[in-house]
Image (spheres, rainbow, N blue to C red):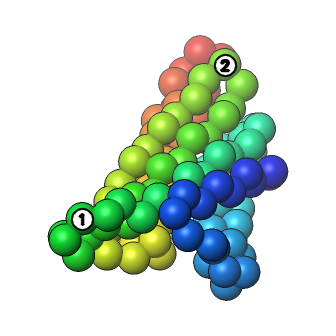
Amino acid sequence: MKVNLQSVNFNVDQKLVNFIQEKLDKLENHFSRIIHADVFLKVVNTSDKENKTTEILLSVPGDEFIIKKTHKTFEEGVDECVSALSRQLKKRKEKLNAHF
């Protein structure tokens, strides 16, 4: 799966890029026809400790899923986004299988 990564207000390190790619690749276990994923990482300038926003847009044939989470670290945000996407992909797969 192709992953497009954009970071706003900071430079992303390779370790985080590899972590995100690894997590998103696991989604293909649930749904094999994923076209691509767009990942947006933003640091919001607030006094709150939870100022890192992770947004993932996942494209599948005929639909798109968008998940947005804000946490203390990008790793936590990616984990939560991927688990939410996993649930949505399982539901989508069940709906598709119900029609056949």
Residue 29 is at least partly visible in this image: no
Tell me the CA gap for discs 1 and 2. 37 Å
Q: Quadrant of the C terminus?
A: top right
Q: Which residue is mark 1?
A: 46
- Give the image location of residue 36, x and y in percent: 74, 43
Q: Is residue 35 above or below residue 98?
A: below
Residue at x 73%, y 51% (from the top left corner) = 4
Mark whose residue sits in front, 1 or 2: 1
Residue at x 71%, y 25% (from the top left corner) = 61
Q: What's the amino acid at mark 2? A: Gly
Q: Check whether the beta carbons of the residues at disc 1 and disc 2 lie within 8 A of each other.
A: no
Residue at x 43%, y 44% (from the top left corner) = 67
Residue at x 57%, y 41% (from the top left corner) = 57
- Give the image location of residue 24, x and y in percent: 64, 60
Residue sitting nearer the eye, 4 or 51 = 51
Residue sitting nearer the eye, 75 or 23 = 75
Q: Is residue 67 above or below residue 9?
A: above
Residue 34: image tag: none
Residue sitting nearer the eye, 2 or 98 = 2
Which quarter of the picture shows residue 93?
A: top right
Q: Is residue 29 above or below residue 12?
A: above
- The residue most toward the right is 2
Is 11 situated left or right of 88 in this image? right
Q: What's the amino acid at mark 1? A: Thr
- Give the image location of residue 83, x and y in percent: 44, 58
- Give the image location of residue 94, x and y in percent: 52, 32
**Earlier sequence position, callout 1 versus callout 2:** 1
Q: Secondary structure at mark 2?
A: loop
Q: Which residue is mark 2?
A: 62
